[in-house]
Amino acid sequence: MARWLGIDWGGRRVGVALSDQEGRMAYGYCTIDVAKQDPVTEIARICDDEDVKNIVLGLPLRSDNDQESETAKSVRAFAESLGAKARIPIHFEDERFTSFAAEQDLKAAGWKPGKDSKALVDKAAAKVLLQDFLDKLPREAAP
């Protein structure tokens, strides 16, 4: 299997998660501040440094009808730029409720909201998104 990278895209911050080498477990990696770093360049660098073979990008869908939201256009444009730079496959995953699930996971671990809360939640949301995707992948049968 290969290492995967998950992205919780946002206009201000981009949460990033990585999988283990086997592509089974996700963990939070970093949060990119869009005002300070170009997320396309930074994510392409991470992919090179960490030997990432696939990217999973959160796609915002509407809760009322499962259609793509207005923000999805920006996410797809980001995916196009990232795909051209990183040159590895990009897969989309429904990102609805990932931030809520991330907050619940963090609270269960004793986290208390504070100054850097949004950045931590974005990174944790990328982890939730990536783990949801990895859990759906078919696995080879055990011997």
Image: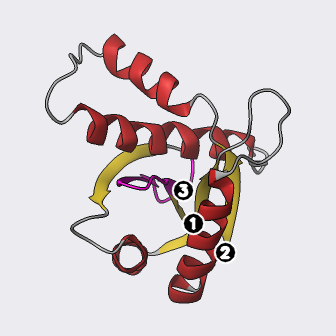
**Looking at the image, residue 38 lies above or below residue 84:** above
**What kind of residue is marked 3?**
Glu
Q: Which residue is mark 1?
A: 2
Residue 46 x/y as whole percent: 36, 72
Mark 1 or mark 2: which comes first in sequence? 1
Q: In the rendered structure, does residue 7 fall within the stretch colored magenta?
A: yes
Q: In the rendered structure, does residue 18 fall within the stretch colored magenta?
A: yes
Task: Give neighbour class at mark 1: few <14, some 14-19, many 20+ (Cα, 10 Å).
Answer: few
Of the 4 image quadrants, the one containing the N terminus is bottom right
**What kind of residue is marked 2?**
Pro
From the viewer's side, name the closer residue of 22 and 37: 37
Rounded to the nearest angstrom, the CA distance separating label 3 from label 1 is: 6 Å
Task: Give neighbour class at mark 3: few <14, some 14-19, many 20+ (Cα, 10 Å).
Answer: few
Mark 2 or mark 3: which comes first in sequence? 3
Q: Which residue is mark 2?
A: 89
Left or right position of 41 against 90? left
**Looking at the image, residue 19 lies above or below residue 53:** above
Circle 2 or circle 3, nearest the eye: 2
Q: Which residues are magenta?
A: 6-24
